[in-house]
């Protein structure tokens, strides 16, 4: 074989290797790629194959569509010391809105209830218009401790049936879900930077998540085929504390993450039992309408005054009547904090006895 042929062959091979092999992080860059057939989990340094999810989702007939091809090299100043990618506003980005939704443990079976199509519409809006890379959810049914927030860091978890007295089939519901340890790690970092104590745990979705999600993101008709990471509330009734929790999570909106907070705008189960015994399904408690209206006013207050308004809301005379405990109202405080300078709006509500089903959005739907 002629020597020049060997030389040129070797040179071509070297050039191909140089072009195709990722640049090592030691050279001051971090390469993040996602191509058709690969699923990029937010916060991961390297691509992850869709096949990794297939064994879990196969039995639920869920298909995952690859995101549009992405190939870029992020400069070293855009990656912090823990390997987390900071927002780079020079790249094409979508700032997602924040949702605060009301739902209940039996909503997935109450198909004739007026809130059912509302939740369906919200779900389609998120999967078809927003198309998030991941979802971070805060539920009324997970409170950690007074000064510590917990974050689910596990990828696969069991369902949590945190209610009692319902028919047996309620305890057999399965909503397909998968977590993202990488996103959870990023959240823990953001909370730490904000001075919020936080720790990672393995915990599945409670009914505050999956009951409404079974309607909004029906596994058969509108699957949510992205990672879901749940973050707890504090075990406190401090409005500012929860508002600041939302502020700490807000930056995730710039990275394609949808933040969803679930609770109820009015939630008094003590009076629910009393009204049920009375048999009057048309009567609304006076505080139901009054507090639902007050919540709308507070949530729609100008962003620079909203935190003050949301705090004052819990000091009104109707607050303890509408919420004997504040666990179901505080998720909207988190949502309002995550909204930053974006305006809030009540998109739908319905007072129902001693409950109210207010649905809220902060910011725009997105591209």
Image: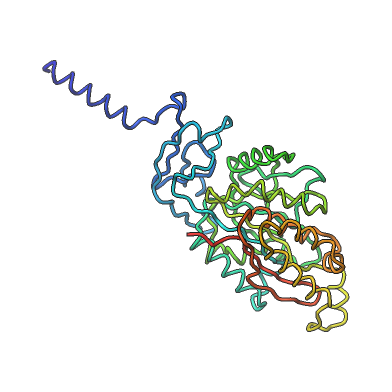
Q: Along the line of sight, which residue is nearer the eye, 7 or 202?
A: 7
Q: Residue 342 sits in which quadrant?
A: bottom right
Q: Along the line of sight, which residue is nearer the eye, 112 or 365?
A: 365
Q: On screen, 133 above or below 43? A: below
Task: Find residue 13 and report its horizontal and vertical position in percent.
Answer: 25, 26
Q: What residue is at 64 percent from the left and 41 percent from the top?
A: 190
Task: Find residue 32 and report its horizontal and vertical position in percent.
Answer: 45, 38
Q: Residue furthest left?
A: 2
Q: On screen, 269 above or below 68? A: below
Is 321 on the left or on the right of 212, as rendered?
A: right
Q: What residue is at 70 percent from the left and 66 percent from the top?
A: 102
Is 29 on the left or on the right of 84, as rendered?
A: left
Q: Along the line of sight, which residue is nearer the eye, 184 or 243?
A: 243
Is 295 on the left or on the right of 340, as rendered?
A: right
Q: Which quarter shows the N terminus? A: top left
Q: Along the line of sight, which residue is nearer the eye, 171 or 324?
A: 324
Q: Residue 120 sits in which quadrant?
A: bottom right
Question: What colouring style does the render use?
Answer: rainbow
Task: Find residue 202 and report its horizontal and vertical position in percent.
Answer: 69, 43
Task: Find residue 334 and report its horizontal and vertical position in percent.
Answer: 70, 54
Q: Residue furthest top?
A: 3
């Amino acid at each position: 074989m002629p020597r020049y042929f060997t030389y040129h062959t070797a040179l071509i091979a070297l050039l191909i290797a140089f072009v195709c092999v990722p640049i090592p992080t030691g050279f001051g860059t971090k390469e993040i790629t996602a191509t058709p057939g690969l699923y990029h989990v937010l916060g991961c340094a390297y691509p992850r194959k869709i096949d990794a999810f297939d064994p879990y989702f196969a039995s639920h007939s869920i298909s995952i569509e690859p995101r549009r091809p992405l190939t870029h090299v992020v400069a070293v100043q855009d990656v912090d010391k823990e390997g987390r990618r900071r927002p780079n506003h020079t790249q094409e980005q979508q700032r997602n809105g924040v949702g605060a939704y009301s739902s209940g443990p039996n909503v997935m079976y109450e198909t004739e209830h007026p809130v059912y199509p509302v939740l369906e519409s919200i779900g389609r809006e998120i999967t078809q218009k927003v198309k998030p890379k991941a979802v971070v959810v805060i539920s009324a049914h997970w409170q950690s401790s007074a000064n510590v927030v917990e974050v689910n860091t596990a990828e696969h978890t069991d369902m949590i049936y945190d209610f009692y007295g319902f028919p047996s089939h309620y305890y057999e519901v399965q909503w397909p879900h998968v977590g993202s340890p990488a996103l959870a790690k990023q959240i823990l970092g953001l909370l730490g930077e904000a001075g919020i104590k936080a720790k990672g745990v393995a915990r599945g979705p409670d009914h505050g998540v999956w009951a409404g999600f079974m309607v909004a993101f029906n596994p058969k008709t509108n699957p949510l085929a992205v990672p879901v990471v749940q973050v707890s509330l504090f075990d406190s009734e401090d409005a500012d504390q929860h508002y600041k929790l939302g502020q700490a999570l807000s930056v995730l909106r710039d990275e394609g993450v949808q933040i969803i907070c679930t609770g109820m705008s009015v939630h008094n189960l003590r009076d629910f039992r009393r009204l049920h015994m009375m048999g009057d399904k048309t009567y609304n408690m006076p505080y139901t309408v009054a507090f639902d209206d007050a919540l709308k006013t507070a949530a729609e207050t100008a962003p620079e005054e909203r935190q003050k308004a949301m705090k004052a809301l819990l000091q009104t005379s109707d607050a303890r009547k509408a919420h004997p405990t504040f666990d179901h109202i505080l998720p909207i405080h988190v949502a309002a904090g995550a909204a930053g300078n974006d305006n809030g709006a009540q998109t739908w509500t319905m007072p129902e006895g001693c409950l109210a089903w207010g649905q809220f959005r902060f910011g725009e739907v997105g591209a």
